[in-house]
Structures are given as structure tokens and as C-alpha cells.
Amino acid sequence: MANAVEALLWGLLSGGALVLGALIGWVARVPVTVTALVMAFGAGVLTSALAFELVGEAVELGGLLPTAVGFGIGAVAYTVANVAVCRLGARHRKRSGTQQMSESEQPGSGTALAVGALLDGVPESVVLGASLLTGSVSPALVVAIFLSNLPEGLSSAAGMKRAGRSAAYVFGLWVSIAVASGIAALVGFLAFDPMSAGTVSLVTALAAGAILAMVVDTMIPEAVEVTHLMTGLVTSAGFLVSLAVSHAGG
């Protein structure tokens, strides 16, 4: 029971970074360059965590085949779902500029934004909760999710504000996603417990594939458009920081 509550709290903490980022993006005029640099750094941190924490663990648990199958399914599933919500108006949901559409420009885009935000946040929360099955949550994974969620919330909220979304909509959305993150982490902990090692390997890799597709489709474009040739360097720095945290955590 205690571990289940802990999984819920870790999920809420990671989701809370979205709310914190949204608050900063709403009340402060953060330079677009700063937002893009933090987004690039967060992308590197998250990529490193999924490579060393998720994929590495999946291979150890079930071997290469279940990992490869799960990873591929996750990437394809995310891409298909992302294409669907993008066509409904959520293509630029993490952009801080004027790319996001208002409800008057594309009816239903508000709902699409909410579904897209949920799509982006659930896979990482599920594996965060599942990581408690090994005894303790991975510090590198927590740091990675937090540091990637913060700029996501910041950039997206800034873009929503420019698109004319209300504060009630923006914060209602991100608080709901934070709560959903907590629930997803709890579900990850409870659902993974009775599974075989091979099944856990496949599902963990599935989440990793979805997360990588999300990073490339939604985070990197915001960074590249503004920081251009600096994106690779900043992303690499995030990758190394996450690797250091993972190594320090044992």
C-alpha cells in the first residue's frame, strides 16, 4: 500500500512540473530563446533516461526481441495517435509562439490540445510508477521527466495565451494532466506487479518508444526553430547530465 501511494506521489510530482512551467509561462515574459534552450536540454535529459533507464532495463528483463517489438509498437502507436490529434488542431501544442490555433480558427482544437497533452504525459508516468517495483524510483528518471515537463508546460502555456486561451482553460488543462500523471504512475505500479519479466520488458520498451517519438515530434521542433545550430550542443549537455545522475544513482 505504501509503495502504491509513493507511486501516486511521484507521478503527481512529475506532472506538477507541467503546472509550474505553465505558471511561469503565463505570468512571466520568458524570452523565446530561453524557452527553446530549456526545451532542448530537457529533450536531451529525457532521451538519455529512456536509453539507459528504460531500454537498458527492458533488455535486461526480457532480452532484445521483446524490447525491440515493444519499442517499435510504442513509436508507431504514438505517431498514429499524434497524427490524429494534430489534424484536429494540436500540432503546435508545445510551441511558445503564435503557431497554436485558437478555438475560432479551428473548432475542437481545445479538446485536441487536451488529448495531445495527455498522450504526451501518460507513457512516462506509467514507467515511473513501474520503476518502484525494483524497490525504489530511479532518480535519473524523475529528474528527466521533471526537467522535460517544466519547459513543456512553460512553452505550451505561453503559446496558448497568445492563441487567446483563458487562464481557466490553461491551468485546468495542466492540473488535470498532473492528476492524470499521478494516476498513470499508480496504474503502472499496480498493473506491472503481476506481469512476467518478458511482459514488463515489452511494456517498458513500448513506453520508451512512445517517449522518443514524442521528444522528436513535439520538443525538438520548438528548440530547433529558435536555437538553430545550438540545439545539438544543448541537447547533448542534457543527455550527459542525465547520464551522470543515472550513474550516481547506481
Image (cartoon, grey):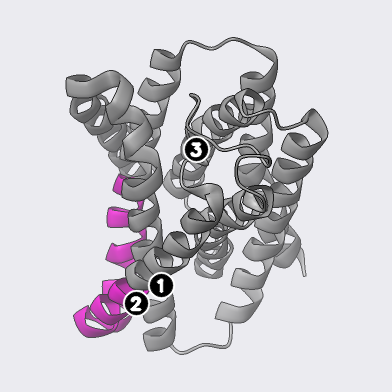
Q: Nearer the viewer, mark 1 or mark 2?
A: 1
The disc labelled 3 sits on which kind of residue?
A: Lys
Q: Quadrant of residue 115?
A: bottom right
Task: Determine if the magenta segment contains residue 54.
Answer: yes
Q: Is residue 92 above or below residue 22?
A: below
Q: Which residues are magenta?
A: 47-73
Task: Determine if the magenta segment contains residue 231.
Answer: no
| Residue shown at the point (61%, 49%) measured from the top left | 113
The disc labelled 1 sits on which kind of residue?
A: Ala
Judged from the image, the secondary structure of the residue bearing numbered disc 1 is helix
Residue situated in front as seen by the camera: 85 or 29: 85
Give residue 49's position: percent from left, percent from top: 35, 49
Q: Is residue 55 visible?
A: yes
For the stretch drawn in magenta, the main secondary structure is helix
| Residue shown at the point (17%, 22%) measured from the top left | 229
Relative to 63, 212 lies left or right: right
Mark 1 highlights which residue? Answer: 77
Residue situated in front as seen by the camera: 23 or 182: 23
Mark 3 highlights which residue? Answer: 94
CB atoms of marks 1 and 3 within 8 Å: no
Give residue 84's position: percent from left, percent from top: 48, 64
User: Which label was assigned to residue 52?
Assistant: none
Mark 2 highlights which residue? Answer: 73
